[in-house]
Amino acid sequence: MDSRKCLAAAAILGFMAVFLGAFGAHGLKDSGFLTRKYGETEAKDYAGMSIPASYKYLLDFETGVRYHMWHALAMGLTGVLMRWHPSKALSAAAWCFALGITLFSGSLYILVAGGPKFLGVPWGMIAPAGGTLLLVGWLALARGAWQVPGAGRS
């Protein structure tokens, strides 16, 4: 991926994160969709406490949006670095961020809208693959930033 495509993709991903964040705050939270979909069933939250499933899924959606935005920003930083010094490591970082957002956040969005299994796919099992790509993206970004000539000079 070159810097222009990376920056454009980062901008579009950032837009989508803001759009989906607004949808989560207004379309999911205020509409009652999650309460209607999941009723009053109980679910375990991350601390092991029992909470309404609708609230757990809202938290999952918000987690997807948060990671989506942070990694869209990281992808933008990657694109800026690529302008100065194109490299395979930075290109790999950009691809990892784009695919990681798609798999991690995307699977959480689908999980919330469609439930644990949607179209026969257990969406909660896809998020770890996306999370791994996000981690690899950060390592590739570190390597690419380290390789930028003259970056450590003052």
Image (tube, helix red, strand yellow):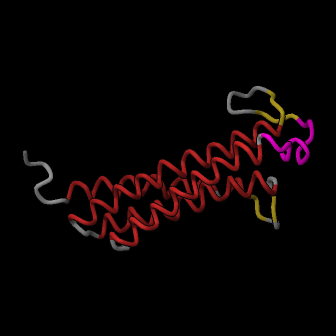
Corner quadrant of residue 47: top right
Tell me: 46 left or right of 132: right
**Residue at 92% in and 41% down:** 39
* Image quadrant in which the C terminus is located: top left
Q: Is residue 150 above or below residue 92?
A: above
Tell me: 72 left or right of 76: right
Q: Is residue 92 above or below residue 15?
A: below
Residue 148 is inside the magenta segment: no
Question: How many numbered marks does the figure carry?
Answer: 0
- Foreground pick, 147 / 28: 28
Corner quadrant of residue 41: top right
Q: Position of residue 150 (x, y in %)?
A: 10, 56
**Residue at 34% in and 63% down:** 79
Q: Position of residue 8 (x, y in %)?
A: 43, 67
**Residue at 70% in and 50% down:** 23
* Image quadrant in which the N terminus is located: bottom left
- Foreground pick, 7 / 141: 7
Residue most extreme to the left? 154
Q: Write the start and end of the magenta stretch as one range.
A: 30-41
Q: Position of residue 32 (x, y in %)?
A: 86, 42
